[in-house]
Amino acid sequence: MVWRYSMVEDENQAMQRSIEKDLFEEQNKILDRFFSLITLTFTVFGFSIAALSFVYGRGISSYQEALRSYHIAFALFCLFIAFFISIGNVLAIFHHRKLVRRGDKVGYREGNELISNNLKIYLDISRRKNYYVIAVTLIGLGLTSFVNHFSQHRGLAAVLTIGFVVIVLMLMRNFRRYLS
């Protein structure tokens, strides 16, 4: 009877270790996504600055003139927030570790500690996926606002905005499938 209980406990422990491994792999995927998002944010910011330099010229006075436009100010604000969401998530993702300190030794989590840590990691991964969708939405909203500033026709601005809103709604409806 004791042997059977020990065998079931060992199977449960092995299953939890397998779950932990899968969760850490998923966490690495999310980390890669946020690094890519940081790169995308810098690329969009560079594109925005290059476009502003081309249209308004160089110099502080021309940038101040451009920032008075609420479209451009809002676009740069969205990029700024998306960048800080990405950086915050990259730094926060290192909070969970596989190994723990046990007195004078370092070891793996075991038993209930492993189960509760797996639950925490799962909830953290779900939260990070939501932050990713928010950051991508902010980058898209910033780009849409930036393009709307240069649009001469209100119809084009309306089409761009409606297209962006439709894409965001589709992402929000199916974001689990796209982010897995």
Image (spheres, rainbow, N blue to C red):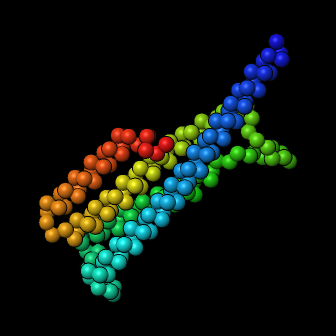
Give how far across and how far down residue 179 sits, in percent: 46, 45
57 or 93: nearer the eye? 57
Give how far across and how far down residue 114 sits, in percent: 69, 35
| Residue 88 is at least partly visible in this image | no
Q: Is residue 91 left or right of residue 167?
A: right
Q: Is residue 92 left or right of residue 5?
A: left
Residue at horizontal 51 percent and vertical 56 percent from the top: 34
Number of marks: 0
Residue at horizontal 19 percent and vertical 56 percent from the top: 159
| Residue 164 is at least partly visible in this image | yes
Q: Is residue 64 left or right of residue 88?
A: left
State which quadrant residue 74 falls in.
Answer: bottom left
The vertical placement of 79 against 170, above or below, is below
Q: Is residue 170 left or right of residue 16?
A: left
Residue with the most extreme bottom position:
59
Residue at horizontal 33 percent and vertical 87 percent from the top: 59
The vertical placement of 99 against 35, above or below, is above
Give how far across and how far down residue 151 sits, in percent: 19, 68
State which quadrant residue 136 falls in.
Answer: bottom left
Give how far across and how far down residue 65 sits, in percent: 26, 80
Residue with the most extreme right position:
104
Q: Quadrant of the N terminus?
A: top right
The vertical placement of 38 against 24, above or below, is below
Residue at horizontal 39 percent and vertical 70 percent from the top: 45
State which quadrant residue 142 falls in.
Answer: bottom left
114 or 176: nearer the eye? 176
